[in-house]
Structure formats: structure tokens, C-alpha cells
Amino acid sequence: MTDMSLAPSDRALVPFVSVANMLRLLNARGTESVLRDLARYIEEDYRRWPEFDKTPRIAAHSRDGVIELMPTADAEHYGFKYVNGHPRNMRHGYQTVTAFGVLASMETGYPLLLSEMTVLTALRTAATSGLVGRYLAPKGAEVMALIGCGAQCEFQALAFRALCGITRLRLYDIDPAATEKAARNLKGLGFEITICATAQSSVEGAQIITTCTADKQNATVLTDNMVGAGVHINAIGGDCPGKTELHADILRRSDIFVEYPPQTRIEGEIQQLPEDHPVIELWKVMRGEAPGRTADRQITLFDSVGFAIADFSALRFVLDAVKGTDMVERLDLLADPDDPRDLFGMIARSAGQAA
């Protein structure tokens, strides 16, 4: 006979959203709808930025890549993401970036949600870019250059259409197969697509320039002569020490907007500049405490490295989205003995049951 006292209690079971269920959620709601919802959650949390505990991500670097923990908390919830970045993984059939995350109760410390975040990180990165574009992109922008056609490319395209009205894409990647992959995936989704032979030609006529390359090195994806007045640059590839995409002269001509300066000065494009170079924090723009785009000829630059509050927002969205659905599993993750003081006794009783 089974000892029902050893069966997992409700407190032991943690809601888990698998990759399969994340894909079900996307297909049920539509990717662009999810991107708009994510942007709304992110904007809500950015507007209450001072309420959060904040720290630069905790990174373990190696010659092959980086593994990071990205924690943050408000009075009610604690969230973190585990994420890696290994550019050479693709040579062996692995993803460059994988991730999972947890949202927990500050009252009890118990997890409320465990979720895949490989897909979710791609979504939240794109949603953040599109949201920032609402504040910084030129009015009436329709054309975006996408330099770097890896895993993030299509998400960026959809986010900028959903949030900023972009309908025309100019694609370039140093690897033609990546460009063809992006064009193939975006074909039939309503975009006007131009495949470009060089980075220089991709920016011609573009009002928004998105750089999302993967190489872990100081690179010059954009040179100063490629950037004319009035554009918005969405620089999302530089996200660790020693990895950049833009020539420093572009930075000096731009108004630079960042998520969290202590992290961006270590990892972003502005690691090329003096520590005291002025930047504008995005949460202040979203709260109306600092200006965004103020002139037609202004060059705005989103120096994006990704920050934990956007992941926190994404986990909040998923927790709400799967509530009351079958798109969530319940994992027996937490030991929860009948007597909280008798964890050892739980082991002994389980041995007796097995016998």
C-alpha cells in the first residue's frame, strides 16, 4: 500500500513551463501579440524602477564563453535567470544562448514558477528593443537594417513591426546562409525584404539600424561613415567585456540610452568611452523624467546589454499567461515533510515505503 503521507503536497509542486509549452503559448496567442504583452509588462516595471533591488549580472567567463546569473527583486517577488553565451557552440550543434529562470515569493521564498528562458529571452530582448524604439526611433520610421541574422533576427523584425510599425527590412550577415535563413523565415509575414551584400549597403535608407552579431570580440560592425543624422541605432550584440560592434566615433555623436549604467559600462558599447561619459537611463525616459528623441537629426543609440528587470517582467507575464491553462506542468521540486523539522524522517519513511 502506498503511504499517502509521502506523496508530494501542493507546496512541493512548482509550476514549470517547458519549451513545448512556451511554443504552445506563442502559437495560441501569436508571436506579435506576445511581444506587445511583454513590452507592456516591461514598461510597467521600468516605470517603477526605484522599487527594485539591482545589481550587475554575476558572470563566470572562460575562453569559450560566459555563464551568468541575473537576479533582481521587488517587495513581492524575487526573480533570476541563468543564461550562457558561447558563440562557438554552433560549430557543434549547440545553441549560442540557452537560459532558464525562476520567479519566487519574497514572503515564503518558495518558487512560484520555473520556466525555460531560451525562447523567452529572445522574446524579451526583442520586446525591449521595440519598446525602446517607441521612445527613440524617428517618427514614421518604416525601414530597418538588420545586421546579424542569427537567432535574434526574426524576433527583432516582428517586435519592431508590432511596436513601431516597421514594414521594410534590409538584411545582412557575414554568413550568407544566415541571411537566407532569416529571409526564408520572414517570407510571407508581410515584410518587404531586401537581402544586402554588405553592411554598408544594408543601412542605406534605413531609419533604424539593429546590430545583433555574435562574435565575442571588439568588432566594428558599424563605422562612423555608415551612420547618418536622424537614425536610431539598436545595438544589442555587445553584451560582455571586450565585445563591441560600433566604432567609438559613432558613440560620441549619439545620445546614448542604457538600462543600468553599472552593468552597461562594463559590457556595452560604452566600455569604449571614459567612465564619466554621459548616458540617459531608460527608466527615466519612460517615467517622463528625462527626454528621449528630441530632434529630427538626433542620433539615438540604445546600448542594450539586457538587464534582469526585463527577465523579471517576462517571468511575471508567463506566470499570468499560463494561470488556469494546461500549458504548465507541476514538478516535485521541493521537499515538504509533514513536520518541517523532520526532513531526515521523510527519508527514513520513504525507505520503508520502498521496502
Image: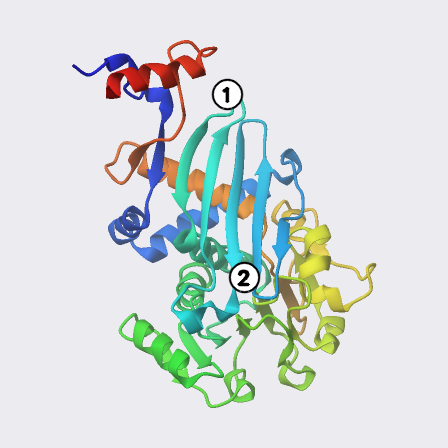
Give the residue number, with chain letter if any, for mark 1: 108
Question: In the image, is 182 to the left or to the right of 72?
Answer: left
Type of residue at label 1? Thr
Look at the picture and state if 355 lies above or below 265. above
Give the residue number, with chain letter if any, for mark 2: 133
Q: Earlier in the sequence, mark 1 or mark 2?
A: 1
Nearest the viewer among 132 and 214 is 214
| Residue at image coords 49%, 84% | 174
Nearest the viewer among 328 and 299 is 328
- Residue furthest to the front in view is 355
| Residue 150 showing in the rendered view | no
Res 165 → quadrant: bottom left
Callout 2: SS: helix
Q: Where residue 160 appears, x then y in whole percent?
A: 45, 64
Type of residue at label 2? Gly
| Residue at image coords 37%, 80% | 193
Look at the picture and state if 153 lies above or below 261. below
| Residue at image coords 50%, 21% | 108
Q: How far apart are the two marked residues, 1 and 2, measured between alpha carbons?
A: 38 Å
Question: In the image, is 236 to the left or to the right of 316?
Answer: right
Question: In the image, is 274 to the left or to the right of 225?
Answer: right
Q: Where residue 205 appears, x then y in whole percent?
A: 52, 83
The quadrant of the image that shows the C terminus is top left
Q: Where residue 271 appears, x then y in whole percent?
A: 73, 64
| Residue 314 showing in the rendered view | yes
